[in-house]
Image (spheres, rainbow, N blue to C red):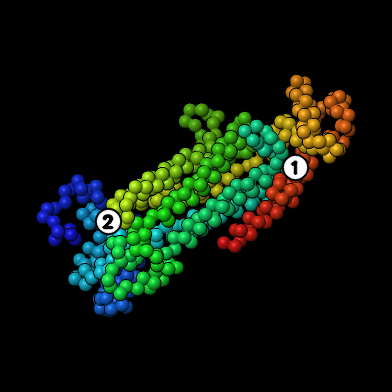
Amino acid sequence: MKLWAGRFQKETDTLVNDFNSSISFDARMYKEDIAGSVAHAAMLGKQGIIEAHEAEKIIGGLQAILADIEGGRVEFSLENEDIHMNIETMLTQRIGDTGKRLHTARSRNDQVAVDFRLFVKEEIPQMIAQVLDLERVLIQKAKANLETVMPGYTHLQRAQPTTFGHYMMAYANMLKRDVTRLEDCLERMDECPLGAGALAASTYPVDRFATAAALGFRKPTDNSMDSVSDRDFAIELLSACSILMMHLSRFSEEIILWCSWEFKYVELDDAYSTGSSIMPQKKNPDVAELVRGKTGRVYGSLVTLLTVMKGLPLAYNKDMQEDKECVFDAIDTVKMCLPVFTAMLDTLTVKEKNMHRAAAGGFINATDCADYLVKKGMPFREAYMIVGRLVNMCIKTGETLDTLPLKDFRSVSGVFDADVYQALELKTCVNGRKVYGGPAKEAVERQIEAIEQFVRER
Ligand code: ARG
């Protein structure tokens, strides 16, 4: 018999039972549901809303249910719709009529809101820890490649010289923002909706501050209608996850390019690559590709929840039951991607020589060549034009700026001297870029220190 059978004259159609039920996915919040109920029951007892011995009996019953669920001794039922009604029904079956007092001054609306928040609150620190592990690998790779010169790109065209270490710290900075975004989300959602009831709280003397504290929240939420209709915390998490995945996806894209034979800047470890079922020569970057692919899936979750919420009047609507699967899936996806991506990066080999060869062959020192003239007093625009002519000349004759004879330099401008070759050396070009944030060794060392400190503080 349904909890609400008093109001109804007919049984729920089985189609509706199946359709309405969320137990298949919200069973995952059993721990949070029981924690919420324990806090609620304890508060009811303390406030004299139920008898102290009743509260004790309820809490004992809930703890026994928890142990049985963890021991795999519990089967949930579809008829009881969701985790909340499953546990409440089970409690009454076990402890008798006292169980019927648990739902005093509470609704499933504030119950689900608190369960979901508790769940998310526990997941976020785990994700942060995984991002920090990736940061540690980036730091390590950066330290090992402070002088590994490679081309930096714009429009995927070789642009200016940088180092693999500088490149790694670019990603380290993106991930640092991801960590702070997750922390921010955690901070803002740290308010407890329990006690908001269905939407208009209740007439009982409930102590929302006590339940908030018992459940580890900073404070109760400030408005009961907002409490039960708000899913911002989930949307914020999905958006932080989407941005994080966007970063991993861009990084994956680079790794996929870098391990192609066209680049050969890196080689993935055998343990983090796959072969082909037909082409014997293949070594594929499947891990990076899957991370890139799964990014779409996480974006999908964000768009799902934004769309579910966009037209909902206050307060709770059943549409909101659609909030959980997308959040669970995004969390699972991110938590699966991060460690495998980190291990793949950790074990990849950097092909320093190939990076250097590409850096030497693509005029990435053209800006430095113009800067050479500027340092000798020429206005930048003029120097830029002259070097453009030189590059054009090189392309025709198959030279690079480093190998172009001095007489050719001087045929375009008399300002050039033999010291131009020193100015064009890749090491000179990189190490001259000492500007804060730049690719010179000492500048990257400062970047590493900053990220190391960020990681250390957490
Ligand atoms: N299973 C529901 C959900 O996930 C719980 C809240 C249901 N509340 C209600 N009034 N139908 O959102």
Q: How crowded is mark 1: few (under 14 residues within 10 Å), some or many (20 or more)?
A: many
**Dot 1 lies on which element?**
helix
Position of the C terminus by quadrant: bottom right
Q: Residues within 10 Å of mark 2 (few under 14, many from 20)?
A: many
- Ligand 1 positioned in quadrant: bottom left
Which residue shows up at 58% across the image and 45% down it?
A: 345
Q: Can you name the residue that lies furthest to the top here?
A: 396
Residue type pointed to by label 1: Val
Position of the N terminus by quadrant: bottom left
Residue 115 in sight in this render: no
Respond yes or no on whether mark 2 lies under 8 Å from ligand 1: yes
x%, y% of residue 445?
71, 52
x%, y% of residue 223?
37, 64
Which residue shows up at 33% across the image and 67% down it?
A: 195
Asked whether the residues under the numbered discs 1 and 2 touch, taking CB atoms below 8 Å apart as contact, a structural biologist would say no
Mark 1 to mark 2: distance in Å?
Answer: 61 Å
Q: Which of 199 and 157 is in front in this view?
A: 199
Q: Nearer the viewer, residue 415 or 119?
A: 415
Residue type pointed to by label 2: Asp
Which residue shows up at 40% across the image and 47% down it?
A: 306
Q: In which quarter of the image is residue 214?
A: bottom left
118 sits to left or right of 289: left
**Where is mark 1, residue-wise?**
430
x%, y% of residue 41?
30, 72
Marker disc for residue 82: 2
**Dot 2 lies on which element?**
loop
Q: Earlier in the sequence, mark 1 or mark 2?
A: 2
